[in-house]
Amino acid sequence: MTRSKQSRWQVMGRATGLAAALATAIAGATPAASVEILPDPRPLGAKVFQGWAFDTCHAPSLATLRAWNSSRYRAVGVYYAGRGRACASQPNLTVSWMRGVKSMKWQVLPIFVGSQSPCVRNTNKKHVPIGSKPFSQGQAEGKDAVSRAKALSLKKRSALYLDMEAYDLKRTSCAAKTLSFIRGWNREVRSRGFFPGFYSSAESGVRHVEQARRAGVHDLPSVMWFARWNGKPSLYGESTLAKSAWNPHRRIHQYRGNIDVTHGGRTLRIDRNKVDAPVAIIK
């Protein structure tokens, strides 16, 4: 972080006092002294992957990943835990699978689908709402996220990604509760030596967290995974994020979703991602 960049953000924060106050109110948190500019995560122990990734509901078999060596993909997002994940049964997702992925030089993006916003838009996620104590609930689920990651042989300094599906930002009390949960999850995951990442819609959770960042709110994600299905992979062209935010090596763009793709005779239904961000570190 340079002093000039920090000063520029401090000036911008004063110039947009009304917007910052609104974001702070939504966040339901005490703002920090200034807007945080994050450093390169690699000297902090992160393993950064730059390239193409896909995520799919069920972790694919090692044979399928081997067949997909013919593709440009070299990282896979896996839904490894969380009470809100759609594919709770993951027969391939074991320690031996993780080590097999590592031996084939694939990278892993671990995704935790925990409790969801009370005003979540996806009707399939309404059965796992955040409760009346969102921050402590976020901490409890962050603890679970780390425990489950360690059980799969993931080491400290791995990135773990919280999946928060799109929710209604106009419902301010709901949005505040959602952000409180996110912050609790981030704090717990970070305190246990992992990088807390965050996945959400660019127009929902991502916009909300960026508002909080501009307001100087603490306990925000270390990595931003934003979904904007425009078919145009762009890590630093996202309109809802300042270019200096979550930079360098702290972004993933999910740019297309729910498509069937075949490589090496194996077909998967995937979401497509461009990555410049920390991944799992497998023992």
Image: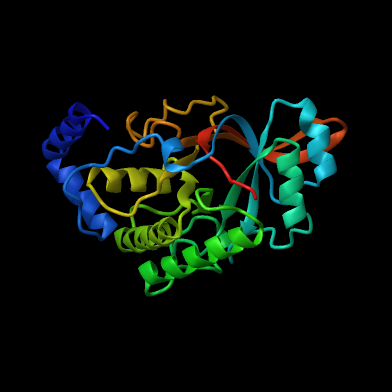
Q: Quadrant of the N terminus?
A: top left
Residue 132 vs residue 30, the one in the foreground:
30
Residue at 74% x, 58% y: name it: 90
Residue at 49% x, 66% y: name it: 143
- Percent across and percent down for residue 203 are 42, 42
Q: Considering only vertical position in the picture, is 100 above or below 241?
A: below
Q: Give the residue furthest to the bottom.
A: 132
Residue at 36% x, 35% y: name it: 241
Residue 20 visible, this orientation:
yes
Quadrant for residue 71, please give it.
top right
In the picture, measured across the screen, residue 134 lies left or right of residue 129, that is left
Quadrant for residue 12, please give it.
top left
In the picture, measured across the screen, residue 140 lies left or right of residue 180, that is right
- Percent across and percent down for residue 100 are 77, 45
In the picture, measured across the screen, residue 225 lies left or right of residue 26, that is right
Number of marks in the image? 0
- Percent across and percent down for residue 282 are 64, 48
Residue 88 vs residue 96, the one in the foreground:
96
In the picture, measured across the screen, residue 140 lies left or right of residue 242, that is right
- Percent across and percent down for residue 16 are 15, 38
Residue at 54% x, 24% y: name it: 232
Q: Considering only vertical position in the picture, is 172 above or below 252?
A: below
Residue 204 visible, this orientation:
no
